[in-house]
Amino acid sequence: MAANLHRVRAQERLAGILLIAAAVLAIACANSPLRAGYEGWLQFDLGPLDVDHWIAEALMAIFFLLVGLEVKREWFEGRLSR
């Protein structure tokens, strides 16, 4: 049980670190001479939408769905249930 908990927390920590690193990299690219290439990549068509719209519409919807599910779990089973 303790090993599983440790492994889950390590994965959560790694996910957070990767998210922060990706955000820092995106900000650095958007504010550097690489800006034109960065903006061009965001306009690349990927199926019916470009990458920018996939991020804004699809990935953000999934993100907020997961946040809502986590809040719901905390509300019924976690610290918010008390």
Image (tube, rainbow, N blue to C red):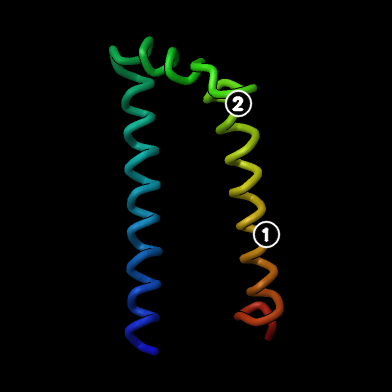
Q: Residue furthest left?
A: 33
Measured Cα–Cα span from mark 2 to mark 1: 22 Å
Q: Residue furthest front?
A: 47
- Indicate which disc residue 30 carries: none
* SS at badge 1: helix
Q: Is residue 44 above or below residue 2?
A: above
Q: Is residue 27 above or below residue 42?
A: below
Q: Disc 1 designates what residue?
A: 68
14 or 33: nearer the eye? 14
62 or 45: nearer the eye? 45
Mark positioned earlier in the residue sequence (2 or 1): 2
Q: Residue 65 in the image: x percent, y percent? A: 66, 53
Residue beneath the point at 38% across and 21% down: 30
Q: Residues within 10 Å of mark 1 (few under 14, many from 20)?
A: few
Q: Residue 66 in the image: x percent, y percent? A: 61, 57
Q: Disc 2 designates what residue?
A: 53
Q: Residues within 10 Å of mark 2 (few under 14, many from 20)?
A: some
Residue beneath the point at 48% across and 20% down: 42
In the rendered image, which quarter contains the N terminus? bottom left
Q: Please state which amino acid type lies under the numbered disc 2.
A: His
